[in-house]
């Protein structure tokens, strides 16, 4: 019994060694040579792309296409195949959007290299340069996925998971860091109003801001006001909260800050004469009169 097992093991190893010893055929083809030296256009070889409605269509040229330029009788197999004894077929690109139509894009006069950027410089076959979502977004305006999913389904199947790989379990908590450093990648799918649906209004106590933000946000606002204005674009947001909560600068609690003695407006009058713009940062907005009019009106 042991001898039989040993024979089977040795036979299997020999078969595996034989298989791996065989050279896997690869296609010898240079896009760069055909583009630069022969001036062959994409449609000369991939002419079936003009009628292709699905990415699953086989757009790779058959040998008959090659023989339009190469002599069938004189061209040896080894001219295009690394293993001339057992020539194979060219590797096909992955099917990534089954409803993608080359025909539609070509009819709209989209250049092949607009999507397959850089393939004209490659000297090896099998490098497809499949465009990513960013490449598509250069022509197609970003769609808010949560509200306009139908725009995505123009190319994607409804059964596909369209979320990027990093949109995992902890994405809701971590996405802020990615949004700060990922340049415009978020905009490939989301318009800015998608962010504002969560990051707007009176959310100082929400997870958008760190703990105790209500107490120390003034320091942060002074140090980086532009960062606040990313979401809170109107100063009225600040004014409404400070007025409602009666939150005032420290000097407003000083003795004799304001009085009604004729000819003496108190310390606030001196402050206003010294830096009136500072007063207006709170006591003025586009929807009300200057607060001075309340006391100093007609």
Image: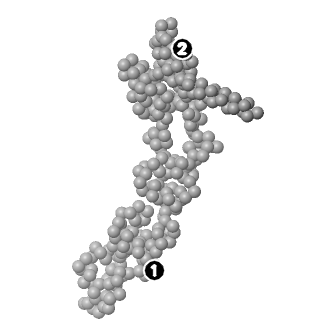
Residue in the foreground of this view, choosing between 28 and 86? 86
**Residue 72 marker:** none
**Residue 64 marker:** 2
Q: Residue placed at 54% from the left, 27% from the top?
A: 91
Q: Residue placed at 34% from the left, 70% from the top?
A: 222
Q: Residues within 10 Å of mark 1 (few under 14, many from 20)?
A: few
Residue in the foreground of this view, choosing between 256 and 174? 174
Q: Position of residue 4 (x, y in %)?
A: 73, 30
Of tags 1 and 2, which is closer to the observer? 2
Q: Residues within 10 Å of mark 2 (few under 14, many from 20)?
A: few
Q: Position of residue 153 (x, y in %)?
A: 59, 42
Q: Position of residue 72 (x, y in %)?
A: 51, 9
Q: Position of residue 230 (x, y in %)?
A: 41, 61
Q: Residue furthest right?
A: 1
Q: Quadrant of residue 151?
A: top right
Are the residues flagged by discs 1 and 2 in contact, CB closer than 8 Å? no
Above/below status of 30 relative to 276: above
- Asked if residue 237 lies left or right of residue 269, the reply is right
Above/below status of 100 relative to 198: above
| Secondary structure beneath label 1 | loop
Q: Which residue is mark 1?
A: 245
- Asked if residue 97 lies left or right of residue 185, the reply is right
Above/below status of 122 relative to 250: above
Q: Quadrant of the C terminus?
A: bottom left
Q: Quadrant of the N terminus?
A: top right
Above/below status of 244 relative to 110: below
Considering only order in the chain, which callout, 2 or 1, is on the residue closer to the N terminus?
2
Q: CA distance from mark 1 to mark 2?
A: 81 Å
């Amino acid at each position: 019994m042991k001898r039989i097992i040993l024979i089977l093991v040795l036979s299997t190893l020999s078969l595996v060694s034989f298989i791996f010893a065989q050279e896997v055929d690869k296609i010898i083809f240079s896009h760069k040579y055909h583009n630069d030296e022969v001036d062959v256009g994409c449609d000369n070889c991939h002419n079936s792309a003009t009628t292709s409605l699905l990415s699953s269509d086989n757009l790779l040229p058959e040998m008959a296409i090659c023989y339009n330029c190469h002599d069938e009788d004189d061209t040896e197999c080894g001219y295009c195949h690394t293993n001339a004894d057992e020539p194979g077929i060219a590797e096909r690109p992955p099917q990534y959007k089954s409803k993608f139509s080359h025909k539609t894009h070509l009819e709209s006069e989209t250049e092949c290299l607009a999507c397959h950027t850089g393939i004209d410089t490659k000297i090896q076959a099998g490098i497809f340069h499949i465009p990513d979502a960013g490449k598509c977004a250069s022509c197609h305006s970003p769609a808010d996925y949560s509200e306009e999913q139908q725009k995505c389904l123009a190319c994607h199947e409804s059964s596909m998971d369209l979320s990027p790989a990093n949109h995992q379990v902890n994405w809701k908590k971590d996405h802020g860091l990615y949004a700060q450093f990922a340049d415009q990648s978020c905009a490939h799918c989301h318009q800015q109003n998608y962010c504002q649906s969560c990051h707007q209004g009176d959310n100082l106590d929400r997870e958008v801001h760190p703990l105790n933000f209500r107490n120390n946000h003034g320091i942060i606002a002074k140090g980086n006001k532009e960062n606040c204005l990313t979401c809170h674009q109107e100063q009225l947001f600040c004014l409404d909260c400070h007025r409602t909560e009666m939150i005032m600068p420290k000097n407003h609690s000083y003795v004799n800050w304001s009085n009604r003695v004729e000819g003496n407006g108190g310390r606030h009058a001196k402050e206003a004469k010294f830096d009136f713009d500072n007063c207006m940062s709170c006591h003025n907005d586009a929807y009300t009169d200057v607060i001075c009019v309340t006391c100093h009106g007609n």
